[in-house]
């Protein structure tokens, strides 16, 4: 058995609290239920009830008095798979190995498969980047080569909004630490940045995606590692003008042709409009968008400004392009137009309201959509 090296599978967390331990425990349970011989070598539930519940029924090899994995006991037990949480964690003095990842290498050399977890913020090569993003220096790191050597890496991800919701509900930290955490490490900009970092690292594109950003920007609530431009389409003829303007903005910020993740068009339809076929203008605009390197998205929403802003924030947009209103002057008695509301509520997202030939002509037969 010792001549065949074990296989390493890693659950890589995009930020603290996304649930990599929970996911790894759930996978260990599934494997055990399918007949795999599984033991737990180290796990940190942080007293979270749902995570702790997943431990029930799983065999645990007790850690050493120092808290380190008892590698000798695991090797003697010789399971098919061992779960080792928090790969980057250092061991206490007096442990057989200085670090947990060295415990894992010992288990792999003994021919035992390992299911491990680690956070993106603990990767050695990202130490400085994480410090610049969060203002916090990671306590400990793991060499990238250890993680890269895994046969499988599964990214465990959650939106910044979901993580902040978990934090606010007390799922991640004690109540007395929640407000400070939300205002500090768990700011939406930090979480969005860490999430982007995880995606870039797993795609092996960190330098390409971050070098320009880190040299010239500071973290804001909307992370700006990549300029992202959202253009609002109404289904009216002005859309072509708006798309071309948005593409120029996106290309200028990237020094060339925009990429699909940098130029996004959104068309907001009311709940009653779900299933309607797009009109000819929209179809032509979608073709133009594809030619210019952008992507098209349809969003359902009764409140157009709110739906547009929600999409833009979810896409980490830095800029929104929409057209001047096609409403006739007398129609403003019913309240401000979409552009006015979006500009007022956009926060850190820059809003460009573009004049076009359709201004003030009325929406005609086109239903009122984003930018109307």
Image: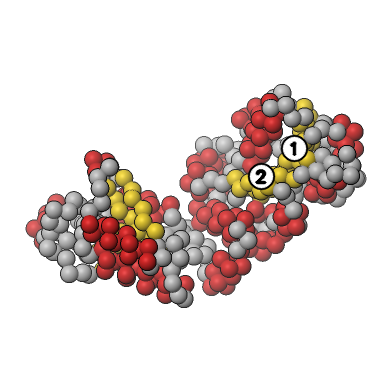
Residue 29: x percent and y percent? 68, 29
Which quarter of the image is occupied by the N terminus?
A: top right
Residue 104: x percent and y percent? 81, 45
Mark number for residue 140? none
Residue 341 visible? The answer is no
Colouring: secondary structure
Which type of secondary structure does the marked residue at label 1 adopt?
Answer: strand
Which type of secondary structure does the marked residue at label 2 adopt?
Answer: strand
Most foreground residue, 368 or 181: 368
- Compared across the picture, whether 29 is left or right of 314 comes to right
Number of on-image labels: 2
The image shows residue 232, relative to residue 49, as above or below, that is below
Q: Which residue is drawn at 38% across and 68% down?
A: 292
Most foreground residue, 285 or 153: 285
Mark number for residue 11? 2
Which quarter of the image is occupied by the C terminus?
A: bottom left
Q: Distance between the residues labelled 2 and 1?
A: 11 Å
**Which image quarter: residue 322?**
bottom left
Residue 121 visible? The answer is yes
- Compared across the picture, whether 22 is left or right of 332 comes to right
Residue 296: x percent and y percent? 36, 56
Query: Within 10 angstroms of label 2, few (less than 14), some, or many (20 or more) residues?
Result: many
Q: Which residue is drawn at 77% across and 44% down?
A: 7
Q: Which residue is drawn at 22% across and 54% down?
A: 279
The image shows residue 268, relative to residue 49, as above or below, that is below
Residue 284: x percent and y percent? 27, 61
Mark number for residue 83? 1
| Label located before the other in sequence (2 or 1) | 2
Q: Which residue is drawn at 67% across and 64% down?
A: 128
Most foreground residue, 151 or 20: 151
- Compared across the picture, whether 12 is left or right of 102 comes to left
């Amino acid at each position: 058995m010792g001549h065949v090296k074990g296989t390493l599978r890693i659950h890589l967390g995009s930020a603290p609290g996304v649930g990599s331990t929970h996911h790894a425990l759930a996978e260990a349970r599934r494997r055990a239920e399918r007949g795999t011989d599984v033991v737990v070598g180290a796990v940190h539930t942080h007293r979270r009830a749902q995570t702790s519940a997943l431990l029930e029924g799983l065999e645990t090899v007790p850690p050493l008095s120092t808290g380190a994995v008892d590698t000798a006991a695991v090797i003697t037990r010789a399971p098919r798979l061992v779960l080792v949480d928090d790969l980057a964690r250092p061991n206490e003095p007096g442990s057989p190995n200085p670090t947990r990842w060295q415990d894992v290498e010992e288990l792999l050399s003994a021919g035992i498969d390992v299911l491990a977890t680690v956070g993106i913020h603990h990767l050695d090569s990202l130490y400085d980047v994480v410090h610049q993003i969060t203002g916090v220096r990671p306590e400990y790191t793991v060499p990238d080569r250890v993680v890269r050597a895994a046969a499988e890496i599964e990214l465990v991800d959650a939106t910044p909004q979901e993580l902040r919701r978990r934090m606010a509900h007390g799922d991640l930290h004690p109540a007395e630490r929640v407000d400070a955490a939300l205002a500090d490490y768990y700011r939406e900009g930090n979480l969005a940045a860490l999430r982007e970092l995880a995606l870039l690292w797993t795609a092996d594109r960190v330098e390409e995606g971050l070098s320009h950003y880190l040299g010239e920007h500071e973290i804001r609530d909307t992370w700006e590692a990549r300029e992202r431009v959202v253009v609002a389409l109404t289904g009216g003829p002005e859309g072509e003008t708006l798309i071309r303007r948005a593409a120029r903005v996106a290309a200028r910020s990237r020094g060339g042709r925009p990429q699909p993740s940098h130029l996004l068009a959104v068309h907001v339809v009311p709940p009653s409009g779900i299933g309607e076929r797009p009109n000819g203008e929209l179809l032509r605009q979608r073709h133009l968008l594809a030619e210019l390197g952008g992507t098209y998205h349809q969003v359902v929403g009764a409140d157009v400004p709110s739906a547009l802003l929600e999409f833009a924030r979810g896409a980490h947009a830095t800029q929104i392009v929409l057209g001047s209103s096609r409403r006739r002057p007398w129609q403003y008695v019913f309240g401000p137009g979409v552009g006015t509301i979006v500009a007022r509520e956009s926060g850190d997202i820059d809003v460009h309201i573009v004049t076009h030939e359709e201004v003030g002509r009325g929406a005609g037969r086109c239903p009122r959509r984003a930018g109307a």
